[in-house]
Amino acid sequence: MKTSIYELVETGDELPFDVSLHRVNYVPSHWHNSVEIIFVLSGNLEVTVGSQQHKLAEGDVFLINPCHVHEVMGLDQNIIATFLIPLSYLKENIKGIERISFQCESGTVRPEQRSALDQILQLLAEMVQLSNKKGEAYELDMGIRMLAVFSILMKQFRTSGSSGAMNEKYMERMLRIITYIDEHYRDAISLQSLAEREFLSVPYLSKFFSENIGLNFQSYLTSIRLKHAVEDLLLREELPIADLALNHGFPNAKSFYTAFKNRYHMTPHEYRKQYRPEMAPRKKEDISSHYLNFNHSSALGIIHQFLERSKSREVRKVETLETRAYEIDAARVGTTVKHTWKSLITIGKAKEGLHADVQQHLKYVQRRSPFQYLRFHGIFDDGMMVYHEDEAGQPRYNFRYVDQLFDFLLSIGLKPFIELGFMPSALASDPDQTVFYRASYTSPPKSVDRWCELVERLIRHCMNRYGAAEVESWKFEFWNEPEFHIFWPASQDEYRALYLRTYQTVKRISQSLQIGAPGRIITVDSVSIVKDFFEFCRHHACQPDFIPLHFYPHERIEDMVNAEFIGQMLDTDPYYQLLEEFGGISPNPDFLKERLNAELELLAAYGLSGCEIYLTEWNSTAYHRELTNDTVYKAAYIVKNLLDNLDVIHGFGYWVLSDNIEETFPSRELFHGGLGLIAQYGIPKAAMHAYELLSKLGHTVLAQGEGYIVSAGDGGYQILTYNYCHFDDLYAMGDISFIDHTHRYNGFKHERTLKIDITLMNVPDGRFKMVKHTIDRNQGSSYDAWVAMGAPESLTKEDVQYLKASSCPRRHVSYVDAEPGAALTVCFNLEPHGVALIELTPTYD
């Protein structure tokens, strides 16, 4: 009975009722043995129950009792929430519900019922939110609210008479009748022929039909014929209206036109013209005229006007405690690891590396968690003053700022990881093509020969200054994300051609110089680009020496970049608009791991499995105003993802080191959601401290599992644990309505405190010094320390010093004795988003 007017309400495994969001086009006549509640979030629609029509507008609620035939027609761009509650579920909880009916319609509510209706609106809105959020024990929260709705309905909206629910005998007969009608509606069936089939009298069947369906037989038959005709009207544009009428049981086109206009208040041609262009783009066999595409993020945003919950306070959660116990053999032969995450860190543009504050940040990170390479954009940006043309149009070169930058980097132990791009404005073929607040020019060069000469002069200058062997150890990444028009406003053929010339220029200087491409985002479907690029490289003998990749877990990032979101993100408000438009973050906490594995398989298919691979940009978001960037969440995010992908590739370049980045207009606020590990004034965030703890791990891994790693090194043992909590489904879809500058932890799910119990077996006997480092909301998080001190808008020098001192990870020192043959046990609690490192070092007293 796939197309029957009877709808079998199917619920999921988690809930005994269904909650859904829709944008309605037209839902034809149907009925079910369930209570249905329609909650209009936006727009207008018309609901017909039996022969009664009801107009609904934004904010209206309408209840349909079981076994009442009804249809729904959208009158404009609407979004509705529907609640289908099977009578079987209600019978388990409400005695005698099958003998009760309700009348609950916003348009007819009495003044004394208004408060009760408002309570129902609140509960319905909360259920929509909970069903999308899917937090811990959300099923119980949903059930409590649904029963609360029916408690209010029983007290305020109950009417006399039966709900309309049928007993089993009548239900069986009715299903048999409507199945026959649905299968033979094209034929000339009549009430007489149907009565003969059921061995009933015509008057009895007519009364039975009207009382149980709410329509007389002829009206019901017409509604079925219209239901099927409307679907063909939209799906089969080539079908003439006269043929459509005859195909669906109407005796002629005139009767079809009359019935159609009476029901839809327009002609079939007008209906087809209005609704067909808006149908969701799906495979032909899956197309339904009932529902249209809409933005779920917008719908969820509308919900919040019906919620009383305030952003001005943190949502209080019941603490959940989960115990995790591990036994580790300290004497086992471990696995040697390189910790390739140490190879790479990033800043924005080359010129930023000359700023005093960024240089202080780089010195800080090299003291606390030293890296091998620093990757950056814009070596040829106008701010570096490398290239200009004189009055005669001849190139002039100046590497003064390049020397200052590279001298500084090498002095603190960092090698340049240079992105060859963007273009000097004087060399750009189209100076109007720019990106970022401090403009970078993205168009191809007006002269490829001059571009190649610029690249060659830069490299030869560096080899003369620093030596060939040194420069041959550097990395040169060709261009940034050429799959996006905003970064490469030319064809892929032109990109490949420029890469080839650049590759040949570099290799002509020295075959040992390392050049990599294409620097693309692996969350974007770019299989064809990859295929064409590597086939081109194979054909022209220009295979890159390494593969640079970028990762941001936005599953629709193509839309964001092509909408030129970077240019819009100059302050906080456009950020909120972008989240609503494009959605938030992938709900998959293992998205990076899965995408990297898929990428490795893709590259192996092109014979590149032995090629070095660097993630030259990665973060939990691409947004420069994502408020959770400042929180302790980022500490657990970094630790989880680096340990999940330990040594899988050759480098992980976290984007970026410093909040002082000129891609966007600088924020006046200290904690504005910047992408950096270090905030303004050199204040390290919890994310920076996560790297500091990671750097203390040894190079022999004894054990690793969900939420922990145990290593050995420097004669002792290191136990690193984390309590990662991912964004909830609402936040992942872009719902940020409950996040503000001082309340940023409302968007996570499965938050629970972990009780960690780790036992090290076969530890050498003796005394150990145990140092525990902890990062959580109470220690190691400068953002939370800032909130605790009153979230001041401006900071004095004393405020800055206080924040730096108070946001260090907690350090606790104790001593433990390992007896011969005994085990050494470490127990502690770890709060949500927390990271803890235990260092066990033998003493020699």
Image (cartoon, rainbow, N blue to C red):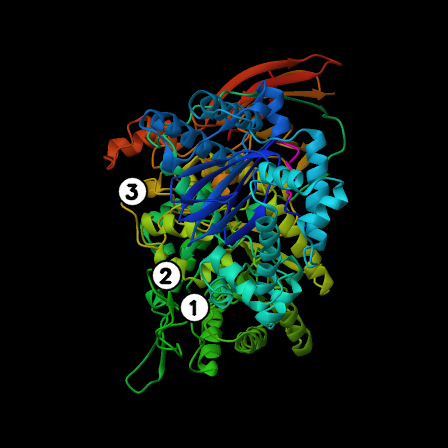
Give the answer, above or below, for where 76 lies relative to 825: below
Say whether marks 3 and 1 touch (CB < 8 Å). Answer: no
The answer for how far apart the CA atoms under marks 2 and 1 are is 11 Å
Please state which of residues 132 and 112 is positioned toward the viewer in this rendering: 112
Please state which of residues 526 and 723 is positioned toward the viewer in this rendering: 526
Q: What crowding class fits label 1: few (fewer than 14 Cα within 10 Å), some (14-19), or many (20 or more)?
A: many
Segment colored magenta? 6-15
x 59%, y 74%: residue: 507
* Residue 164 relative to residue 170: left or right: left
Q: Does the magenta-highlighted stretch encompass residue 150?
A: no
The answer for how far apart the CA atoms under marks 2 and 3 are is 20 Å
* Residue 839 relative to residue 350: left or right: right
Give the answer, above or below, for where 340 lies relative to 802: below
The answer for how far apart the CA atoms under marks 3 and 1 are is 29 Å
- The residue that label 2 is drawn on is 436
**Residue 601 seen:** yes
Q: Amino acid at mark 2?
A: Phe
x 51%, y 63%: residue: 481
Whole-percent x, y for residue 384 in the image: 35, 65
- The residue that label 1 is drawn on is 422
Q: Amino acid at mark 3?
A: Glu
Please state which of residues 58 and 110 is positioned toward the viewer in this rendering: 110
x 37%, y 35%: residue: 108
